[in-house]
Image (cartoon, grey):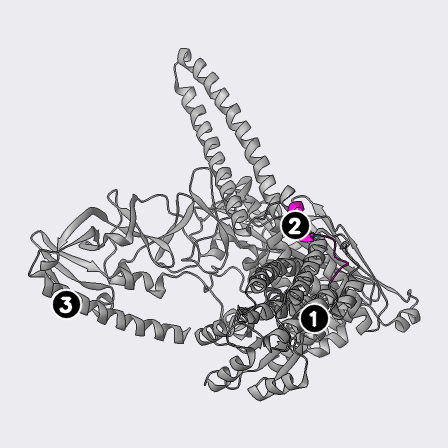
């Protein structure tokens, strides 16, 4: 099982099981220490809730029984004796057995169904194999170690430093060559020999670093399969819900990507697949009437292309209708009617990426597609990817995502412009040209050139970045780079291009936030930094004129993005809710307890709060009451998400002031999203 | 954003008050033993300035600075500080000072704040000097309000006045942050 949530769950379960086991053992020795029960109860309860979230009914049933036993002891209805504690330990063993089997992707060595049934009856689990925990521990120690993601990131950074240093050595070697020429011949020969040896050493060092780099990056790479398992489930559930017949296939599950990228990719894929099912694939009857097979097909495929990964989502549904999209875009005021007329069918598809296009329900009815595509585009830009669309009305829709393998090292073209050196990520580069003045024509106020027959706007990169531009005299050919982003192309005049290079991406440090035009910086062979351009920023409306750091519209968009506070002591629940909401463009902040939530809600202003009930310290009801009593949050919507499903609990939640109550057992992302959207849009 | 700023100013006024009390208390004690303040002394806008050494990480010659497009003019550029990209900032306009060109004597003082390290461009650095607190005065006559914000007072030394920068306030100034948070 590679599902990311499952992994998180298993890690969380490990902690709770360890604390259950040690607590139970202490209790066994000192039955009088009933104050331990509360913490044990919380462990069992959190495990139960998290197991429900990820759909592990068996674990949820076992932990439910454990919770009941612990409750009985806490309320004094059951004696704290060796027998009950043994039963509880057996329960913990069984859960450990199941989770470890899940982690290894093998069936558990336990007849789970029978165990659950017997366990519920209070029969000590005689089905359990002897000493499963020790066995598990031994097996795990043998060939794997746990490594902190931070340690891995540090390792990658260090290797990055080594690459930079190798480049510096190579630059020094060049300098040495120059010096060699200036020496008298009798000294030059031994010097040159020495230089040759040094060159070989550096070359070998280079190979080692390259190898080390690949291996280190490999540590952070995970196959697509880690996120695709959950997607199959999503498609299955959605097709049932929407009464569609769908065959879902995944190709290239083994393709590996940086885990940071996979994290970013998941919400995008959820989005695209949801679109494919709810707006692409027609109902079976409609398909038959149109002469298509009843069963629609959705294909998710991944493959390598050069130094990037192509991920495609293709469905054979009703496709995207360019005319309807244009009409909808005009109605929504996204573009002028006259502008729409001039667009080709292909260009029309990309209107769905414009902010403001997808918010209207009517759009989904008319064009069939395009819900939240601007969010998809934003997410793709965040991971330095590119997205292309193709579709034929009534036949198919295909969304292709081009993603880099990793974000820590990029292939880039090094250029100079305005006296500075810049790195342009190769993902966005279409081609390099030499353009003569005579080839430039003007269209309206813009200068344009023909690139492979297509009219392409031409800008001065220095002008766009607000750097001093050199005025070229005469008809000397100008170096031009053609950049692509989605369906758009622009040509930029640069001073010169230096060549391709692998660049190590460095952040600009904490003094810098998100700076327009910049993705980060790298350090060149001479030891000086060079800035890495964030190419999508060059495509923002406004053309070549130097612009303010942040346009008012962008500022507005950032401000409008609703902020949600997710409060839950279980990391599984937190991660799941966060990724569901963040995938929809909400700004999500998490808190691990009621106290933490009070602190965070005071420091910021949230539009919505989602809270668990049972947490260490302040519980969700108390939190809700406190928030209601505060001036800032008296009217803010609060959703309670809990594994407590009794009407009494729901009543308590409403009394405390919550607007909605979602039971974790019935928890699915649709319901949460629906509720959130209903409350804050 | 607006509320954040308000808080910032509130805190700043409280800090200023605390700082004044601190200095007053110090000047009372000073009469007993001669107290010195270890400071890094340098030239800014032709005048001599100083701040306490514990803010300073190092003093370096000005390396090649890479201009950053479309950011405030305060940020002159970035440079490579042993693998860390660091900003070089020209704080002279913040203090209302003239900006004579930085010659061969020009240096970067790398200072460490709570959130980030940054490089302050100065016309010359004169090293670490113990400054006699007895000669310190909190009031500096004829300073504009904007300058007062970042200046705690001055030392009346034989060779001339040295102004003491309020590094804490300076490093907390929102003008120093680049781009959207």
* Image height of A175 relative to A665, above or below: above
Q: Mark 1 highlights which residue?
A: A65
Image position of B153 with respect to A180: above or below: below
Total number of numbered labels?
A: 3
Q: Find residue A122 and report its horizontal and vertical position in percent.
A: 73, 69
User: The residue tagged with tag 2: helix, strand or loop?
Assistant: helix
Q: Position of residue A401 (x, y in %)?
A: 68, 56
Q: Secondary structure at mark 3?
A: helix
Residue to which mark 3 is pinned: B24
Where does label 2 land, which residue?
A: A134
Mark 1 burial class by Cα count in 10 Å: few <14, some 14-19, many 20+: many
* Quadrant location, the N terminus of chain B: bottom left
Q: Is residue A30 left or right of residue B88?
A: right
Q: Quadrant of residue A358?
A: bottom right
Between tags 2 and 3, which lies in front? 2
Q: Is residue A354 visible?
A: no
Magenta stretch: residue A136 in it? yes
Cα distance in 3D space between marks 2 and 3: 67 Å
């Amino acid at each position: 099982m590679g599902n990311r949530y499952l992994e998180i769950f298993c890690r969380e379960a490990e902690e709770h099981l360890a604390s259950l086991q040690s607590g139970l053992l202490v209790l066994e020795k000192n039955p009088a220490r009933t104050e331990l029960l509360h913490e044990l109860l919380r462990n069992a309860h959190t495990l139960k809730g998290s197991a429900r979230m990820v759909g592990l009914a068996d674990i949820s049933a076992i932990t439910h029984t454990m919770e009941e036993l612990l409750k009985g002891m806490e309320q004094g209805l059951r004696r704290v004796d060796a027998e009950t504690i043994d039963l509880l330990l057996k329960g913990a063993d069984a859960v450990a057995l199941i989770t470890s089997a899940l982690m290894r992707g093998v069936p558990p060595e336990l007849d789970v169904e029978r165990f659950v049934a017997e366990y519920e009856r209070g029969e000590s689990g005689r089905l359990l194999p002897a000493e499963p925990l020790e066995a598990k521990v031994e097996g795990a120690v043998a060939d794997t170690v746990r490594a902190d993601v931070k340690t891995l990131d540090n390792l990658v950074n260090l290797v990055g430093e080594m690459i930079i240093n190798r480049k510096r050595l190579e630059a020094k070697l060049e300098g040495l060559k120059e010096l060699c020429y200036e020496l008298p011949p009798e000294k030059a020969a031994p010097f040159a020999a020495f230089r040759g040896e040094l060159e070989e050493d550096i070359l070998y060092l280079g190979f080692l670093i390259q190898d080390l780099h690949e291996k280190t990056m490999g540590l952070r790479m995970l196959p697509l399969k880690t996120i695709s398992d959950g997607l199959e489930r999503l498609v299955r559930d959605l097709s049932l819900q929407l009464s569609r017949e769908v065959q879902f296939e995944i190709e290239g599950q083994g393709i590996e990507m940086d885990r940071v990228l996979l994290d970013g990719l998941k919400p995008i894929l959820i989005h695209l697949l949801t679109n494919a099912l709810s707006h692409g694939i027609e109902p079976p009857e409609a398909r038959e009437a149109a002469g298509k097979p009843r069963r629609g097909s959705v294909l998710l495929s991944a493959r390598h292309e050069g130094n990037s990964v192509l991920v495609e989502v293709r469905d054979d549904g009703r496709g995207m209708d360019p005319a309807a999209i244009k009409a909808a875009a005009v109605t929504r005021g996204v573009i002028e009617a006259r502008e729409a007329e001039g667009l080709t069918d292909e260009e029309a598809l990309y209107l769905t990426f414009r902010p403001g296009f997808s918010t209207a329900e009517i759009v989904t009815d008319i064009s069939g597609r395009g819900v939240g595509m601007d969010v998809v585009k934003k997410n793709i830009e965040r991971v330095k990817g590119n997205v292309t669309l193709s579709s034929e009305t009534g036949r198919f829709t295909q969304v292709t995502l081009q993603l880099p393998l990793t974000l820590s090292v990029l292939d880039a073209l090094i250029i100079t412009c305005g006296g500075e050196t810049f790195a342009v990520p190769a993902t966005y580069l279409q081609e390099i040209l030499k353009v003569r003045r005579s080839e430039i024509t003007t269209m309206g106020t813009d200068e344009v050139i023909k690139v492979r027959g297509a009219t392409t706007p031409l800008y001065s990169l220095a002008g766009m970045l607000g750097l001093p531009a050199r005025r070229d005299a005469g008809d000397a050919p100008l170096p031009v780079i053609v950049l692509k982003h989605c369906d758009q192309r622009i040509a930029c005049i640069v001073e010169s291009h230096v060549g391709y290079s692998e660049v190590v991406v460095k952040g600009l440090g904490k003094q810098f936030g998100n700076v327009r035009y910049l993705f980060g910086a790298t350090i060149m062979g001479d030891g000086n930094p060079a800035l890495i351009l964030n190419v999508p920023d060059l495509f923002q409306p406004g053309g070549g004129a130097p612009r303010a750091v942040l346009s008012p519209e962008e500022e507005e968009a950032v401000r409008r993005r609703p902020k949600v506070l997710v409060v839950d002591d279980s990391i599984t629940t937190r991660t799941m809710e966060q990724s569901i909401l963040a995938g929809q463009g909400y700004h999500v902040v998490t808190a691990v307890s009621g106290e933490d939530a009070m602190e965070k809600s005071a420091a910021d202003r949230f539009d919505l709060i989602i809270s668990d009930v049972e947490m260490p310290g302040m519980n969700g009801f108390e939190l809700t009451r406190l928030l209601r009593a505060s001036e800032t949050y008296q009217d803010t919507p609060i959703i309670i998400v809990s594994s407590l499903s009794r009407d009494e609990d729901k009543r308590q939640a409403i009394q405390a002031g919550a607007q909605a109550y979602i039971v974790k057992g019935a928890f699915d992302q649709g319901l949460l999203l629906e509720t959130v959207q209903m409350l804050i849009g | 954003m607006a509320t954040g700023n308000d808080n910032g100013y509130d805190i700043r006024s409280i800090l200023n008050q605390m700082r004044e009390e601190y200095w007053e208390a110090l000047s009372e004690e000073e009469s007993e033993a001669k107290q010195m303040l270890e400071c890094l002394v340098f030239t800014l806008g032709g005048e001599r300035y100083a701040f306490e050494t514990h803010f300073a990480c190092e003093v370096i010659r000005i390396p090649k600075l890479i201009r950053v497009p479309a950011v405030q003019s305060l940020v002159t550029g970035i440079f490579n500080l042993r693998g860390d990209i660091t900003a070089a900032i020209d704080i002279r306009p913040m203090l209302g000072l003239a900006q004579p060109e930085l010659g061969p004597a020009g240096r970067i003082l790398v200072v460490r704040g709570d959130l980030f390290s940054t490089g302050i461009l100065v016309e010359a650095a004169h090293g670490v000097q113990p400054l006699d607190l007895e000669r310190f005065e909190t009031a500096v006559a004829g300073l504009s309000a904007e300058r007062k914000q970042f200046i705690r007072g001055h030392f009346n030394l034989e060779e001339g006045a040295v102004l003491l920068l309020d590094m804490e306030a300076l490093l907390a100034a929102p003008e120093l942050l680049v781009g959207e948070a």
